[in-house]
Image (cartoon, rainbow, N blue to C red):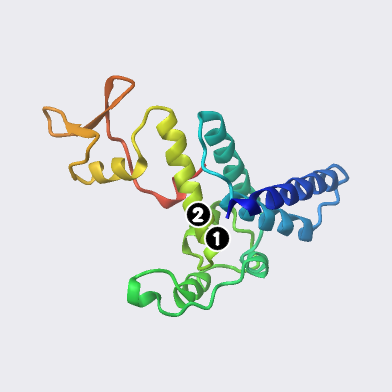
Amino acid sequence: MNNKYPLYLSASIRVLKERKQEQECNNERKDTLLRVVFYGIKSSIYTPESINYEQALTEFQFISAMKDIIAKVTPNEFMSVFPVEKYFKGYKHDMKDYYSTMEYLSTLNLDEPLGEGALMFLAEYMNNDVHRFFVRSVVSLSSLRQYEGHIDMYEEFMAAQGANTPNTFKNNKGEPMYLRNGKPEAIGFKINKLELVK
């Protein structure tokens, strides 16, 4: 799988340089922007796992930049690059499918840039590459937080919901805590899809 990473990364760098040149000439083309989205998502999903803080930070920054670029495209433009997949049985597994995606899209102006709703759009969109990019964005944030001494986001979420987890404990008030850099820290996790990647 990772043998595709150098190819997509190279294409992503090439098209980012092309976009920068167009911006400098005040002549940014929409097809260039859409190629940035395509190669950016593809290179992100094939990026090898981070093995140190610097790699985790670089990946997080790249994904954040991609989210900002995706915010500039409209749903119709995005669908021309990553079509909604024709998977129709999501109701059986309580997951996204073609129907739920089309229902969500019906609530949007398809010719207006995604803007602040870009991350929600990615979360609601049924396409395997887009889904993997969205998951990668959450994993990237969790990985970066772990390098900064926090516990895994999933474990923090479960502890915030009252579950007993391996790396958490409750203080004398019954509040969930964990050790960060040798000091107790309160669980402050609040689930909000729009704030998972900034």
Circle 2/circle 1 CB separation < 8 Å = yes
Q: Quadrant of residue 39?
A: bottom right
Q: Quadrant of residue 171?
A: top left
Where does residue 30 sit, x and y in percent of width and height?
77, 59
Q: Quadrant of the N terminus?
A: bottom right
Where does residue 52 sit, x and y in percent of width and height?
51, 31
Q: Three-letter amino acid code at disc 1?
A: Val
* 82 shown above or below 165: below
| Mark 2 closeness class: few <14, some 14–19, many ≥20 residues within 10 Å | many
* 13 shown above or below 144: below
Where does residue 34 sit, x and y in percent of width and height?
71, 59
* Rendered image: mark on residue 30: none
For the residue labelled by badge 1, is the local secondary structure a helix, a strand or a loop?
A: helix
Residue in the picture at 56% in, 61% down:
129
**Residue projecting furthest to the top:** 182
Q: Report whether 64 appears left or right of 91.
A: right
Q: Report whether 92 appears left or right of 142.
A: left
* 175 shown above or below 67: above
Residue in the picture at 75% in, 46% down:
16
Q: Report whether 35 appears left or right of 145.
A: right
Q: Between 51 and 94, which is closer to the camera in this rendering?
A: 51
Residue 97 makes an appearance in the image? yes
For the residue labelled by badge 2, is the local secondary structure a helix, a strand or a loop?
A: helix
Residue in the picture at 81% in, 56% down:
29
Q: Residue tagged by mark 1?
A: 130
**Residue projecting furthest to the right:** 25
Q: Three-letter amino acid code at disc 2?
A: Phe
Q: Residue tagged by mark 2?
A: 134
Q: CA distance from mark 2 to mark 1?
A: 6 Å
| Mark 1 closeness class: few <14, some 14–19, many ≥20 residues within 10 Å | many
Q: Between 140 and 51, which is closer to the camera in this rendering?
A: 51
Residue 71 makes an appearance in the image? no
